[in-house]
């Protein structure tokens, strides 16, 4: 009886210690042990020895089985996730819209940008300057006909008859006015003076006023004549064709880029409301847009963002090099940290393995004791 108990106890101790030692040898010793040039067997432990291989395999496992484009896509498309995002954004947006701070202050605090209004105007100026310079550089050899939109050219062409008639009408109105009549009188007088004696004779016999009275109706008659209309229309059409055929470089000397840029920036600053609002408290002007932001902008924005993100997940994951990130992170883990991590997860299971080794050792010891008794 004592023999059986003794052998069971010895078997249990050996089985338990063996399994416990095997578990310990997964991690320890942490480093290789050498006696002179001879390496002590089983040093370092299994995991320290295969640390780099473990890191690579974990990286592959995460990318291939844990964090996949398909799995993330399902999560992003789920109504629970999208509704959670919308709710969170609404709460954050409400804080901003009802803030007594200005947009400039919020930008300075959260984005670390000093004087955001000034920065935005400078960026606008730089953008316009760059765009204008690039446009002139790329289109210097092109004609106005190539540059102007076809619809605009058709509109101008269709308006030429109206413009012609407008010019003639304004000319007639001016000639019929006292000022116009006086101007014609002065011109006649100047003309006669230039003609010397002949002019004096004409002036003496006819009188200046009588000559004006005769010339003015004839000029009006000339302006009302259909031939004059057709002549002026043809001249304008010919001039327009010439202008369309000119290259952009022909106008460069007349284009002051600094003035154009300044005008555009000033117009943007004056007519874009944000430049006025940026220095005002958010709560003063955001109320009119609160409903739109909460019920339209945020839900549609989240839907669009998730749709775009889902359709490019595989490409994004590749660009993130997630496998390399996991591999590098695991490689930087110390063996002590890995041991702590594994034991924190599987401590109970390792204890059960130890207990199972003791149980099996005890059973083997019991069987051995029975064999010894039978043989003896």
Image (cartoon, rainbow, N blue to C red):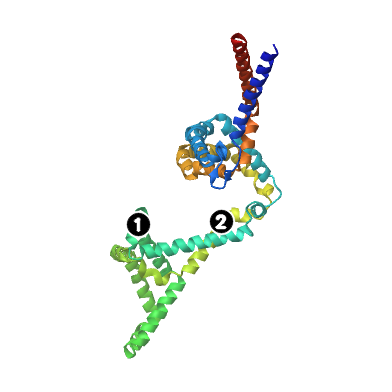
Q: Residue at x 41, y 78 (%)?
A: 185
Residue 271's disc is 2
On the image, the x and y values in percent for residue 366 come to 63, 14
Q: Quadrant of the C terminus?
A: top right
Q: Residue furthest bottom?
A: 197
Residue 9 lies left or right of residue 303; in this view the side is right
Q: Say above or below: 251 vs 20.
A: below
Question: Observer-nearest residue: 351 or 288?
Answer: 351
Q: Residues within 10 Å of mark 1 (few under 14, many from 20)?
A: some
Tell me: residue 62, above or below residue 163.
above
Numbered mark located on residue 228 in the image? none
Residue closer to the observer: 200 or 47: 47
Quarter of the image holding residue 300?
top right
List the residue tagged with mark 1: 153
Residue 227 vs residue 61: left or right?
A: left
* Residue extending farthest front: 376
Confirm whether residue 3 shows in the render: yes
In the displayed structure image, the side of residue 362 where residue 194 appears, left or right: left
Q: How many marks?
A: 2
Residue at image location 48% in from the left, 42% down from the top:
316
Q: Nearer the viewer, residue 278 or 155?
A: 278
The image position of residue 173, as x and y in percent, is 42, 66
Distance of mark 2 from mark 1, alpha carbons? 28 Å
Q: Is residue 238 left or right of residue 322?
A: left
Residue 87 in sight: no
Under circle 1, the secondary element is helix
Q: Which mark sits nearer the N-terminus, 2 or 1?
A: 1
Mark 2 element type: helix
Q: Nearer the viewer, mark 2 or mark 1?
A: 2
The quadrant in which residue 34 appears is top right
Residue 355: horizontal and vertical position, in percent?
65, 22
């Amino acid at each position: 009886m004592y023999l059986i108990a003794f052998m069971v106890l010895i078997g249990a101790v050996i089985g338990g210690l063996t399994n416990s030692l095997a578990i310990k040898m997964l991690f320890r010793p942490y480093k290789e042990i050498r006696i002179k040039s001879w390496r002590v067997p089983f040093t370092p432990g299994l995991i320290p020895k295969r640390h780099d291989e473990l890191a690579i395999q974990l990286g592959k496992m995460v990318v291939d089985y844990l964090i996949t484009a398909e799995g993330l896509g399902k999560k992003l498309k789920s109504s629970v996730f999208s509704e959670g995002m919308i709710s969170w954004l609404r709460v954050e947006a409400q804080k901003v819209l009802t803030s007594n701070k200005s947009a400039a202050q919020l930008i300075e605090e959260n984005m670390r940008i000093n004087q955001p209004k000034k920065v935005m105007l400078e960026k606008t100026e730089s953008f316009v300057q760059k765009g204008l310079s690039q446009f002139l550089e790329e289109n210097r050899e092109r004609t106005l006909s190539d540059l102007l939109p076809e619809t605009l050219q058709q509109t101008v062409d269709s308006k030429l008859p109206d413009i012609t008639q407008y010019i003639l009408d304004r000319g007639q109105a001016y000639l019929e006015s006292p000022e116009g009549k006086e101007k014609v009188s002065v011109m006649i007088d100047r003309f006669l003076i230039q003609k010397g004696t002949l002019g004096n004779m004409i002036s003496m016999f006819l009188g200046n006023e009588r000559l004006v009275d005769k010339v003015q109706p004839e000029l009006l008659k000339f302006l009302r004549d259909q031939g004059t209309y057709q002549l002026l229309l043809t001249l304008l059409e010919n001039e327009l064709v010439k202008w369309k055929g000119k290259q952009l470089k022909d106008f460069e000397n007349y284009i002051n880029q600094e003035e154009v840029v300044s005008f555009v920036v000033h117009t943007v600053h004056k007519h874009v409301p944000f430049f006025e609002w940026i220095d005002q408290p958010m709560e003063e002007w955001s109320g009119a847009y609160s409903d739109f932001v909460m019920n339209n902008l945020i839900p549609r924005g989240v839907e669009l963002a998730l749709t775009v993100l889902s359709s490019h997940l595989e490409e994004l994951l590749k660009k993130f090099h997630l496998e390399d990130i996991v591999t590098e992170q695991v490689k930087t883990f110390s063996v002590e940290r890995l041991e702590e991590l594994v034991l924190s997860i599987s401590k109970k299971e390792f204890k059960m393995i130890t207990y199972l080794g003791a149980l099996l050792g005890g059973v083997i010891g019991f069987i051995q004791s029975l064999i010894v008794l039978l043989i003896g």
